[in-house]
């Protein structure tokens, strides 16, 4: 049979990786897919800086719409990133009956509901395995492998750049900005790296994971988002002293009250497997009622790991070309007319334990005041770590670990603690999860 003809948008980190993997593994990929996969056209803004990338056999252009409009192209692979023109390109491709593979989590998180509806109407596939946790086949695992389960919660290290920074800060005491610059050089970071360090990228991915896990529409604007910029080396060290690691996690959990959607730094017990996932690696822990806990681990970013997922999607698309569109795996795992309108909880309704770091002037009565405020709001203390005061300033750090508390109550307690004259800086708070 004739090879399937691909149009590739973007020849950067992931686009370049995709070209290399498709070329190097051509024979095995063809044996798996049943047909060859051939890139016949590609677009990039920087055609004269493609380095040693072998683009033999591809019509090259700087106009991505030209590739989408190319009548010979059957499948579009979108690897340019961002919302526009990616949205317009993808919708245009769908309108022409072309299947789409994308690594663009921002696009799916923001416009996925619209894109999948249009794809459904046109009977085409939009595959997005590379959008979440790079090379880890997490979309496939949840959507297909766990289809028998009621998924109760999932928690993942889903931003490689943030995990790389936290790991280097802990192991080598390195400076935040130095490590971020290295992550950018290595091709891990987003075009706008604030997306990595402020939690936006993780929130995009969590939006997608929650939809396919719980069968709800994509709701990026309901995700609570906090990045790693507020985490100091002291916090990382104190957490270690207490037997915890700080990881930037995306957490989606359902309870009878609704669904929690949140990304933030989290203290987790250091003996958990996921606490030991370091560097640019990602891991996602998924808890299904039948299977129990399952853990998926691997490279979350980088050229070839991400290309691994892009090519797997291409193989899926090629294999499914002959399947009646009604019988293909649904984009969001659940049938499109069977998505639920489950409530997403506001953050002050969410319950977690907390790590609190207080900067205090060492004088009698401070701890009594703090513990009274916590007790008044029904917040019980699990552990206290009091550091030696500085000899000159008499200032000291006090670390408190609380039991689980409703976030709204904790906010009130922090307000009152910060009003004490002996507490001389804003209280640092980091949520804690047992992940059991
Ligand atoms: N880098 C990773 O590790 C990684 C991992 C998973 C997902 N992703 C996602 O993959 C996508 C691509 O990321 P990347 O790291 O390869 O980016 P990149 O910046 O390395 O490459 C982007 C490519 O798209 C081209 N491009 C941009 N705008 C264009 C336009 N309007 N018309 C034509 N070409 C255009 C650029 O010239 C470049 O070739 C993004 O959505 C990103 O979030 C990246
Ligand atoms: N910037 C992303 C790329 C993978 O999606 C990360 O660091 O995880
Ligand atoms: Na993936």
Image (cartoon, rainbow, N blue to C red):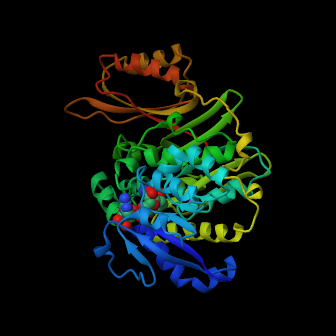
Which residue shows up at 31% across the image and 69% down it?
A: 46
Q: Is residue 272 above or below residue 259?
A: below
| Place of residue 346 in the rendered image (x, y in percent of width and height, measured from the top left) | 55, 26
Q: Is residue 243 visible?
A: no
User: Does residue 310 appear left or right of residue 195 in this picture?
Assistant: right
Q: Is residue 159 above or below residue 340?
A: below
Task: List the single residue furthest toward the front.
Answer: 71
User: Does residue 16 appear left or right of residue 175 in this picture?
Assistant: right
Observer-nearest of 164 and 335 = 335
Observer-nearest of 336 and 291 = 336
Query: Where ligand 3 lies, by image quadrant?
Result: bottom right
| Place of residue 324 in the rendered image (x, y in percent of width and height, measured from the top left) | 76, 61
Quadrant of the image occupied by residue 61:
bottom left
Which residue shows up at 53% across the image and 65% down it?
A: 76
Q: Is residue 288 above or below residue 281?
A: above
| Place of residue 253 in the rendered image (x, y in percent of width and height, measured from the top left) | 64, 38
Which residue shows up at 56% across the image and 61% down it?
A: 100
Q: Is residue 213 visible?
A: yes
| Place of residue 403 in the rendered image (x, y in percent of width and height, measured from the top left) | 57, 29
Which quarter of the rendered picture does the C terminus lie within? top right
* Number of numbered discs: 0
Observer-nearest of 72 and 305 = 72
Quadrant of the image occupied by residue 283:
bottom right
Which residue shows up at 53% across the image and 78% down it?
A: 22
Which quarter of the rendered picture does the N terminus lie within? bottom right
Q: Is residue 11 above or below residue 139?
A: below
Task: List the single residue furthest toward the left.
Answer: 392
């Amino acid at each position: 049979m004739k090879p399937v003809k691909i149009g590739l948008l973007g020849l950067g980190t992931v686009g370049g990786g995709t070209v290399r993997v498709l070329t190097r593994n051509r024979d095995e990929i063809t044996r798996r897919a049943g047909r060859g996969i051939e890139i016949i056209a590609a677009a990039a803004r920087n055609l004269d800086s493609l380095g040693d990338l072998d683009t033999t056999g591809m019509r090259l252009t700087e106009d991505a719409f030209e590739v989408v409009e190319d009548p010979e192209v059957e499948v579009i692979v979108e690897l340019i990133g961002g919302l526009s023109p990616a949205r317009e390109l993808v919708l245009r491709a769908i309108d022409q009956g072309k299947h789409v593979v994308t690594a663009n989590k921002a696009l799916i998180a923001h416009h996925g509901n619209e894109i999948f509806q249009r794809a459904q109407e046109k009977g085409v596939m939009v595959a997005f395995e590379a959008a979440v946790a790079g090379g880890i086949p997490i979309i496939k695992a949840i959507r297909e492998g766990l289809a028998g389960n009621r998924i109760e919660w999932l928690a993942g290290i889903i931003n490689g750049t943030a995990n790389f920074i936290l790991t280097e800060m802990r192991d080598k005491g390195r400076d935040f900005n130095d490590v971020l610059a290295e992550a950018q050089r290595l091709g891990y970071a987003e075009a706008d790296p604030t997306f990595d360090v402020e939690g936006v990228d993780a929130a995009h991915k969590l939006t997608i994971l929650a939809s396919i896990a719980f069968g709800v529409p994509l709701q990026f604007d309901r995700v609570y988002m906090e990045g790693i910029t507020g985490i100091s080396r002291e916090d990382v060290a104190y957490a270690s002293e207490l037997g915890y690691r700080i990881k930037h996690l995306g957490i989606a959990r359902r309870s009878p009250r609704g669904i929690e959607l949140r990304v933030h730094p989290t203290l987790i017990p250091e003996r958990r497997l996921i606490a030991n996932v370091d560097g640019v690696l990602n891991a996602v822990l998924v808890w299904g009622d039948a299977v129990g806990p399952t853990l998926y681990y691997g490279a979350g970013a980088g050229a070839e790991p991400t290309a691994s997922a892009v090519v797997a999607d291409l193989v899926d698309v090629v294999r499914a070309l002959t399947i009646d569109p009604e019988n293909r795996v649904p984009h969001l795992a659940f049938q499109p007319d069977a998505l639920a309108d489950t409530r997403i909880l506001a953050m002050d309704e969410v319950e977690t334990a907390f790590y609190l770091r207080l900067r205090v002037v060492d004088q009698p009565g401070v701890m009594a005041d703090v513990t009274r405020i916590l007790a008044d709001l029904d917040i019980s203390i699990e552990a206290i770590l009091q550091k030696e005061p500085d000899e000159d300033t008499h200032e000291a750090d006090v670390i408190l670990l609380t039991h689980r508390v409703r976030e709204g109550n904790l906010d009130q307690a922090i307000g009152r603690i910060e009003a004490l004259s002996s507490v001389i800086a804003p209280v640092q708070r980091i949520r804690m999860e047992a992940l059991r």
